Structure formats: structure tokens, C-alpha cells
Amino acid sequence: MNKTIRNSIIILIVIFGAVLVLMQKMIDPLMGEEASDFDNANLFEQIKDGDIIFQTSKSSQSKAIQIA
């Protein structure tokens, strides 16, 4: 592979990673407030057929979904 193309790809990956980190830093406070407002006691009363439920964890997949 051409060295210039390889360097360009590396730069694009680094920029994309930086954008993802910045988005996470901006979105995290919003998600924290939303999660604290949620009432777990009435969980089964609030869930309806067709609802999509997300589980958070420390995995990279969870972070990607949270950012999206």
C-alpha cells in the first residue's frame, strides 16, 4: 500500500476517534440526567410491545450505541 494512502487513512481514523470522544463528552451529561429521572419501580408498567431496551456497560459497543 502506498505510504501516503496509509498515512491518510491513519489520520482519518484518528480524527474520527477524536470526534467520537468529543461527542461522548457532550452527550454523557445529558444521559446522566435522563437516567436519574427514570423510575425503576414502574419499569414493567412503562414497557410496551415493540419498545427497544438498551443496557449500558463499560464495553466499546455500549459506548458506541450511547453516542449514536
Image: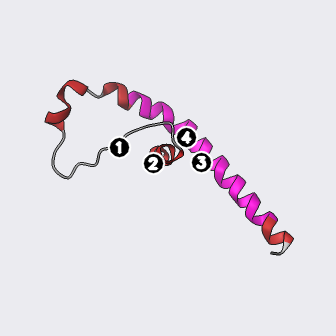
Which residue does the image show at 46% across and 50% down from the upper left?
68
Q: Are marks 3 and 4 in contact (CB under 8 Å)?
A: yes
Report helix, strand or loop for mark 4. Answer: helix
Quadrant that contains the N terminus: bottom right
Position of 42 compared to 55: left or right?
A: left
Kindly identify the amino acid type of the residue bearing the numbered disc 1.
Phe
Real-space CA distance between mark 3 and mark 1, rounded to the nearest whole angstrom: 19 Å
Residue that carries the numbered disc 4 in the rendered image: 24
Alpha-carbon distance for marks 3 and 4?
Answer: 6 Å
Front residue of this view, candidates 41 and 32: 41
Which portion, as a residue range, is magenta? 7-33
Vertical placement of residue 56 versus 65, above or below: above
Q: CA distance from mark 3 to mark 2?
A: 11 Å
Mark 2 crowd level (few <14, some 14–19, many ≥20, 10 Å Cα): few
Residue under circle 2?
Answer: 65
Amino acid type, residue under disc 4 in the picture = Gln
Quickly name the residue at label 3.
20
Residue topped by disc 1: 54
Q: Tell me which label, 2 or 1, sits earlier in the chain.
A: 1
